Image: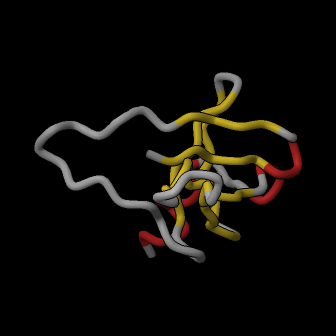
Amino acid sequence: MYQIVIVDENAEVPVPGARSDHQFRVPQIGEHILVKWRGQTKVCEIEDVWTHVNLDQKQPYQGAVQVLVRWSKGIDPQLYIRRFKR
């Protein structure tokens, strides 16, 4: 499970769990993903990915993975498709 952090809007967008027949993976830096926020959808580039590791327990465990994007750099999905269609 991971969440998207929109850094320039100070917002966190939870990502719902994957379907059972789909391998769930965290996107990598430089990848483009569709982000829906406040009724708008944009194609945003991943700027950073990190995770919280809790070391307070005897067995350390990984917390939520956060994926950092900037909303101001996102583009409309139709423009994105048109740009790469040529």
Instruction: Determine whether, in the image, residue 13 is placed left or right of residue 8.
Output: left
Percent coordinates x, y for residue 79 in the rendering: 59, 55
Percent coordinates x, y for residue 26 in the rendering: 44, 61
Instruction: Determine whether, in the image, residue 78 is placed left or right of residue 69.
Output: left
- Asked whether residue 12 appears in the rendered view, the answer is yes
Percent coordinates x, y for residue 47 in the rendering: 70, 70
Name the residue furthest left: 21
Q: Which residue occupies 86% across, 41% down? A: 9
Please determine whether, in this image, residue 41 is positioned above or below residue 85. Answer: above
Please determine whether, in this image, residue 58 is positioned above or below residue 9. Answer: below
Pick whichever, 61 or 30, lies toward us: 61
- Asked whether residue 52 appears in the rendered view, the answer is no
Q: Quarter of the image for the N terminus: give it.
A: top left
The total of numbered circles placed on residues is 0
Q: Which residue occupies 76% across, 47% down? A: 6
Pick whichever, 69 or 56, lies toward us: 56
Give the colour scheme shown: secondary structure
Percent coordinates x, y for residue 21 in the rendering: 11, 44
Name the residue furthest front: 58
Q: Quarter of the image for the C terminus: give it.
A: bottom left
Q: Which residue occupies 86% across, 40% down? A: 10
Q: Which residue occupies 51% across, 57% down? A: 58
Instruction: Determine whether, in the image, residue 21 is placed left or right of residue 2.
Output: left
